[in-house]
Amino acid sequence: MRIETAQLPDYADSDDKILTTENAVIVLDGASAFRPVPVPASLYAATLGEALQLRLRQEPAADLRAVLSESIRAAVDMLELTPGDSPSSTVAIVRRSGDQVDELVLGDSPIITAAGVFEDPRLDELELPERRAYRDRLASGAGYDEHHRTMLRELQDAQAERRNREGGYWIAEAAPAAAAHALVRSRNVRESPWAVLATDGAFNTMTHIEADDWPRMAGMSSADLFAELERCQAWEAHVDPDGTDLPRSKRHDDKSIAAVCWDA
């Protein structure tokens, strides 16, 4: 199992976290908080990621939803969090178990394999008017001003009302029951000889600027992956600094990517 990773900024300064075990890769994206939360998103994502890593090392073939539920509970207990008043994080896990590759996604950090993009569309499918409004405003050229930040706070208020409930969307936060709603799939390793895991800050820009040759990226070194992240950062800074071409919540979101290859 070959794993290459890259992050921008690095692990300590990012809300994104990448952790590995002998047979699994875990990618998390702590949600930037534009409304008050008791602990930083980076701390929550790191705590959850370390709990996932520990459990997958102890039980390498355990049910992924069960592992996620136990890990959310561990993070909640450690950080003393309350549902509805907590930071949240996406979760993406790829694991090799014998001849089988298992995948889990919760939230908008996709997993790309030869079988296609595996993603959780439920937040996007809500089509919240607050989300459309801030993106339309950016597309008009308004830029990242104080009113933009106000709109993001309003969006997060609207998302919080729909978080981890039927008819809304599901995310790792302070409710272990959300793990039961994670999306999972399994394939034979011959069908999925490689995987790329990415946070949306990397995936969205890579897709937009057509830097998304995933089979090629799966074979890249960490240095080459980092160069791709820098290419995305440069495009955002110099070509689309105000989010007019690619409306997004921030000029630069944290970017993380992991490339995994297995011997069949």
Image (tube, rainbow, N blue to C red):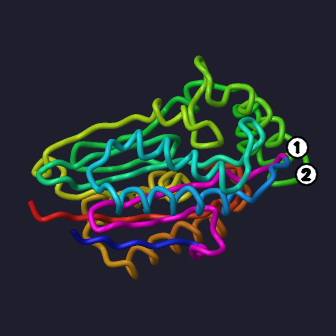
Asked if the residues shown at circle 2 and circle 1 are in contact, with their CB atoms under 8 angstroms apart, the answer is: yes
- Which quadrant would the N terminus be assigned to in this image? bottom left
Q: Does the magenta stretch include residue 139?
A: no
- Which quadrant would the C terminus be assigned to in this image? bottom left
Look at mark 2 in the image and give the residue it sits on.
146
Q: Is residue 172 above or below residue 198?
A: above
Q: Where is residue 238 in the image (x, y as percent from the top left)?
A: 65, 69
Query: Type of residue at label 2?
Result: Glu
Q: Position of residue 4 (x, y in %)?
A: 34, 73
Question: In the orientation shown, which residue stands out farthest toward the top?
Answer: 167
Q: Is residue 172 left or right of residue 151?
A: left
Start-end of magenta stretch:
9-35
Q: Is residue 199 above or below residue 138?
A: below
Q: Nearer the viewer, residue 153 or 51?
A: 51
Residue plotted at (32% across, 60% down): 24
Q: In this view, does 159 lie to the left or right of 262?
A: right
Q: Does the magenta stretch include residue 32?
A: yes
Q: Which element carries disc 1, helix, strand or loop?
A: helix
Which of the 4 image quadrants contains residue 115? Answer: top left
Residue plotted at (51% across, 71% down): 7
Label 1 neighbourhood size at 10 Å, few (<14), some (14-19), many (20+)?
Answer: few
Q: Position of residue 46 (x, y in %)?
A: 59, 63
Q: Which element carries disc 2, helix, strand or loop?
A: helix
Q: In this view, does 123 lie to the left or right of 101?
A: right
Distance, label 2 to label 1, CA atoms, is 6 Å
Residue plotted at (66% across, 73% down): 13
Q: Is residue 92 left or right of residue 16?
A: left
Q: Where is residue 99 in the image (x, y as percent from the top left)?
A: 11, 51
Query: Type of residue at label 1?
Result: Thr
Q: Nearer the viewer, residue 59 or 14?
A: 59
Look at mark 1 in the image and give the residue it sits on.
150
Q: In this view, does 177 lie above or below 195?
A: above
